[in-house]
Amino acid sequence: MPQVKVDLGERSYAILIERGLISKLGALVRQALPGAKRALIITDTNVAQSYGEQARAALEGVGFAVFKATVPAGEASKSLAQAYSLYSSCIKAGLERSSVIIALGGGVVGDLAGFVAATYLRGIPFVQVPTSLLAQVDSSIGGKTGVDLPEGKNLVGAFHQPSLVLADLDTLTTLPRRELAAGMAEIVKHAVIRDAGFLHYLESQADEILGLEPGVMGAVVERNCQIKGEVVAADERESGLRAILNFGHTVGHAVEASMGFGGWLHGECVAVGMIAATAIAQEMQVLQEPELRVRLERLLQRLGLPTRLPEGVTAASLSALMMRDKKVEGGRIHWVLPVRAGEVKVTPDVTPAAVQRAIDSIRG
Ligand SMILES: NC(=O)c1ccc[n+]([C@@H]2O[C@H](COP(=O)([O-])OP(=O)(O)OC[C@H]3O[C@@H](n4cnc5c(N)ncnc54)[C@H](O)[C@@H]3O)[C@@H](O)[C@H]2O)c1
């Protein structure tokens, strides 16, 4: 079974990638956490319908006392109010320090359940069972957990590494197409920042990816987990290298914020953000392979992602929003710019004129 290890000393864990893993959930959790007797599955309304009972049966099958808490699907559930209500679920389930929380769902469930696991009794183990493509290739790995505040996304959180990540490829078959495409954006991001050969692979296998061909999807998810796992292992708490994962996110977050976080999906915004960062790299003569921009545009479009800003969004409106971003230090934005396929550079040295010209070149 394809397996990726995230190397973090005593907090190391395995990511398993295979079809049908949910049916083996019980045995695998038992193996990873031999002392756990009680399990609380945290999931959302969409995922519960398709996979909730299968997960419960797999855990009960090996003797776990199993409890389930289902939150409404959607970003609004990543709230302190929802975390508060889940603490009650933990208490009702009689969870102890040695018990386990199972995060069964997309990134929203992973971040929320992970945050509850990080904070309940000052931290109990949790297992990620990511069911969206974005969660399988990105959010379930790395230990960032948290909730949103009305003032902004992910403003309250904790680093808490999972004990195990189980990416069941079969779950992708029920994921809506638009959500699937949004996950592809992070896949393309990982290729651009770390692996030119993988970018070629994505270009050559776009049809198979769109058709969810299991062999190809397994390879794609595995390579992504390796890339994200390596970056996280090198910089667990985001003090250096991990910043490269923000490629496409400076403009991407600003686009998301400009639409009040309710318009385009995060991955769609990141897709445009990657084109914006590539255009800025071109303007600043950081980009050594001018053809990368065309390649990226072609690939993202092929995968069903936007490469132009939403109508009405301008450089001026985005600039104000970008200054509020986490990646601003001392009033300067730290940009992640591509140098060539597989290599990016983090730099504050970008002129406002370059940003203006780059944004103008991708206006919708
Ligand atoms: N912790 C991190 O490092 C990190 C990284 C990136 C993103 N995130 C967070 O992840 C979240 C986005 O994650 P997401 O895109 O998975 O969103 P999501 O969890 O909202 O899932 C998207 C939609 O797909 C549904 N869904 C999930 N799996 C399904 C399946 N197999 N079949 C049918 N429907 C399914 C969900 O119910 C939801 O409606 C954001 O909150 C973002 O901040 C966290």
Image (spheres, rainbow, N blue to C red):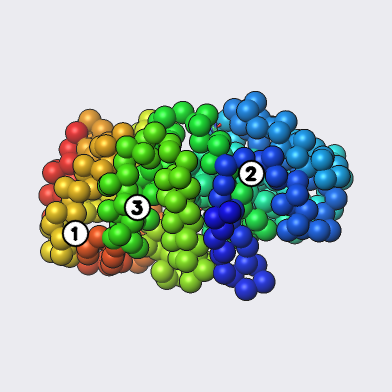
Q: What SS does tag 3 mark?
A: helix
Q: In which quarter of the image is residue 180?
A: top left
Please tell me which residue is depicted at 31% across the width and 34% down the height of the picture: 304
Amino acid identity at mark 3? Lys
Write down the residue under mark 2: 21
Q: Where is residue 100 in the image (x, y as percent from the top left)?
A: 76, 51
Q: What SS does tag 2 mark?
A: helix
Q: Where is residue 274 in the image (x, y as percent from the top left)?
A: 28, 49
Q: Can residue 101 be seen in this view?
A: yes
Q: Where is residue 184 in the image (x, y as percent from the top left)?
A: 38, 43
Camera-side mark, 1 or 2:
2
Cα separation, mark 3 vs mark 1, equals: 15 Å
Camera-side mark, 3 or 2:
2
Write down the residue under mark 3: 189
Q: Look at the numbered discs 1 and 2 and tell me whether their residues touch, using CB distance below 8 Å.
A: no
Cα separation, mark 3 vs mark 2, equals: 26 Å
Amino acid identity at mark 1? Ala
Q: Is residue 95 left or right of residue 42?
A: right
Q: In this view, does 49 lie above or below 346?
A: above
- Binning the other alpha carbons within 10 Å of mark 2 as few (below 14), some (14 to 19) or many (20 upward) gives many
Does the residue tagged 2 have its C-beta within 8 Å of any atom of ligand 1? no
Write down the residue under mark 1: 281
Specify which label sits upstream in the sequence, 1 or 2: 2
Q: Is residue 119 visible?
A: no
